[in-house]
Image (tube, rainbow, N blue to C red):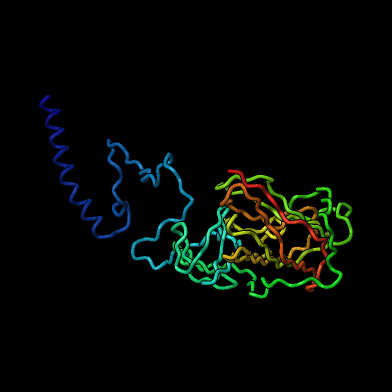
Amino acid sequence: MFAALAAVAAWVVFDFRSQPEATKSQGTGGAGPAAKAPSEPLFGIPSRLGLGKRSSDPFSTHSWAPPPPKPGSTAAAPPPVAPPLPYRFVGQFYRDSGVEIYVGRGEEIFPVKQSDTIDGQYKVESVKTNEVAFVHLPTGTRQIIEFSALREKDFAPQPAKPGTAQASAAPPAPAAKVASSGDPAPAAAIPAGPAQLRWDGPPNARAGASFNVALRVTSGEHIRAAPMQVRFDPKVLESVSVRPGRYFGGETGSFGFRVNPEGSIFVGASSQTPAAASDAEFLVLTFKPLRAGVPAEIAVSSLNLQGAAGRTIAYDSFASFRTTIAP
């Protein structure tokens, strides 16, 4: 045992003395085995290569939106885009104080004035006789609705040319209904000859309760414009609203009206879409009866149907509308 211990001690002393020589040989940069890098320990565990840091969580949500710009980055964000304008032109109301422009969104109709804010999204920048300019507030985009300007002469009653209107004591029998709108009707369903008009409304009304009465037309020719004047008794009826029928209610049509206190309504309507009419809705009026026990009458005192190039379209005379007002 003493001999073994002496041998181990002698080997340790020899090993410690040999290490400085190996280090010195590495520092001199000489060739040969002494210049090689030290190898792994004989009895140690070899080191492993690192797997690297995981770049992202495979179970995290992924967004396809572009990443936000880094702080201090000079890359500009894309400018916001305004949605299509949700409003359309509906009509013009001529008052003594000026012209009121009406726009619509869906079934809702309302007037617009300069500096108005609608739905908190659009500001009315300007209102002119042929356009309304809006500004989309979130994006600052300017959007315009254009329409045909109606002039005072469009409301002036124009007498029909000699021989263009055929008078008759009784109203003509209405044509067979083929279409109840301004859409083109089959030519075979529209009788040849002058246009035919008739009133369509309730035979009885109640005092204080509004009712609608429509003027309907049948014509084999396209009616481009129809300035007219309607009369009623302001002591018996109160005008509530005036709107175009489906024949003039398209996007290419223009419509304007003016209600006078003496009981007359001047209407100017035009349409650029060629279409024949078979008992089509031409004009819709809403009245509120003021007195009970008296008959109410609504009549067209002047009408000029205009076709292509302003040519007058003949029409048969027709009776006025009458209804009885009950308490």
> Quadrant of residue 8 in the image?
top left
Q: Residue furthest left?
A: 2
Where's residue 37, x and y in %? 30, 51
Residue at left offset 40%, top offset 57%: 68
Q: Is residue 16 rendered to the left or right of residue 150?
A: left
Which residue corresponds to the image point at 79% horizontal and 74% vertical from the top-left? Answer: 309
Judged from this view, the residue extending furthest toward the top is 1
Give the camera-side residue of 20 and 183. Answer: 183
Left-right relation of 175 to 6: right
Q: Is residue 326 above or below residue 250?
A: above
Q: Would residue 38 appear left or right of 293 to someone viewing this image?
A: left
Residue 319 quadrant: bottom right
Residue positioned 51% across, 72% down in the render:
97
Q: Position of residue 12 (x, y in %)?
A: 15, 38
Q: Position of residue 322 (x, y in %)?
A: 70, 52
Q: Is residue 78 visible?
A: no
Relative height, residue 56 to residue 93 (above, below)? above
Q: Where does the image place residue 7, in percent across and percent down from the top left?
A: 15, 32
Q: Is residue 152 above or below residue 123?
A: below
Identified at 30% across, 36% down, the residue is: 45
Residue 19 visible (yes or no): yes
Look at the image and tell me in which quarter the C terminus lies. Answer: top right
